[in-house]
Amino acid sequence: MLSWPRRQHGRAAIRPALVALAGLSMVTGVVLMLAVAPSAWAADAHRNLLAARALLDGTFGTVDGYLYSPLAAALTIPALAVPEGAAVVGWLLLKVAILLIATRVATRGLQSLDRLLASAAVIAFLPVLYDLELGNVTILVAAAIAMVAWTPDRAAAGIPLGIVLATAPKPQLIPVLVWMAVFRRRALGGALGGAGLGTLAGLVVLGPGSYGAWIAALRAPPDLTAGNFSLSGMPPLAAIPASFAVVAATLLALRRGPAPGLVAALACGLLVSPYTILYAAGVLLVAAPALARTVPRPTFVLALLAPVGLVVAFPLWVGSVLLLAFTVQRGRWAGGSLTSVTAGSVERAGPVDSPP
């Protein structure tokens, strides 16, 4: 998911930057993750397995903190056939494989060692490490968004995101759906259709009672204020005007083109969501190819600052990403593909990445 312009800056300038980024990310990320490992390891994965068992037992809705739909619990049931430890490790390996495949797609045009370093930097990105440690679903959410953003506009590209919407409809996805309404209308139709069919199938097979329990859980969510990184975690006097400013900025960014619009939509979802946990910032990797190709130096600086910036000043760090959608000249975004780093991909993606 990380890319770097090859021809403009030369191989000699790329590799040291990737070495520094991968090294720093791994050291700081591992240290921070070890600090929270006793309380965080596989917490979400175990909760998902508990919800699957509850669904089978007819007690869905009793698992504390589980906010995914009954369909999500049903899709987890096959994992109950293996020992819990094996299920957790399998879930971890699946997400690592998705990250490696996505990074390989996004770094076409770089040498093998550079692609390996990029993969290390992606896996060591603090929100990604946190997602892997918890056993969360953010990596799958990011992959579903990438399917829409990195491929031609067709209904099939939106189906994975539709499954996400039917199982884990996170508020941060709303700006992404708005972006799709402007630049990926066919994919939006596939996503909404997939979400609707998935939900209907869940209602028919699992019954309305489980969905009623899910809605009740959503109406009385657990207290997330301690880990909330969004603007809603700030005092209202600052949070309300800041949220309006972020939404207005995102709407303006959508007028600048698909790449700045995607950057803004992803940042907006993180900042104005009712709650944002640290791992949610992993979706920003979807915009990393366009950012790193168009503005490599600011992207590199933000990546280096991520381990500290995301922890101590999350809104400021994400706001800086949003700011790039406006500070970069509009014409420069045309040289950055949403899908890969090869020069040819820009021409191939041109008609796809143009507003309708």
Image (tube, rainbow, N blue to C red):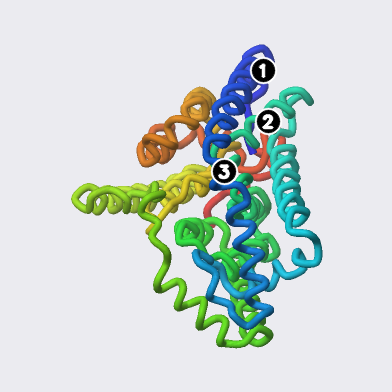
Looking at the picture, how far across and down is residue 166, in whole percent? Answer: 59, 71
Q: Label 3 amino acid?
A: Pro
Q: Residues within 10 Å of mark 3 (few under 14, many from 20)?
A: few
Check contact, mark 2 vs mark 1: CB within 8 A: no
Q: Nearer the viewer, mark 2 or mark 1?
A: 2
Residue name at image x 48 percent, y 35 percent: 331
Q: Name above or below for residue 96 compared with residue 60.
A: above
Residue name at image x 73 percent, y 29 percent: 115
Check contact, mark 1 vs mark 3: CB within 8 A: no
Q: Residue furthest left?
A: 237
Q: Distance between the residues labelled 1 and 3?
A: 35 Å
Q: Residue 120 carries which label?
A: 2
Q: How far apart are marks 2 and 1 (CA)?
A: 13 Å
Looking at the picture, how far across and down is residue 225, in whole percent? Answer: 36, 54
Q: In which quarter of the image is the C terminus?
A: bottom right
Q: Label 1 amino acid?
A: Arg
Does dot 3 land on a helix, a strand or a loop? Answer: helix
User: Which one is earlier in the sequence, the residue at label 1 or at label 3?
Assistant: 1
Does dot 2 land on a helix, a strand or a loop? Answer: helix
Q: Quadrant of the N terminus?
A: top right
Looking at the picture, how far across and down is residue 306, in whole percent? Answer: 48, 32
Looking at the picture, how far across and down is residue 282, in whole percent? Answer: 55, 44
Residue name at image x 65 percent, y 48 percent: 150
Q: Mark 3 points at which residue?
A: 38
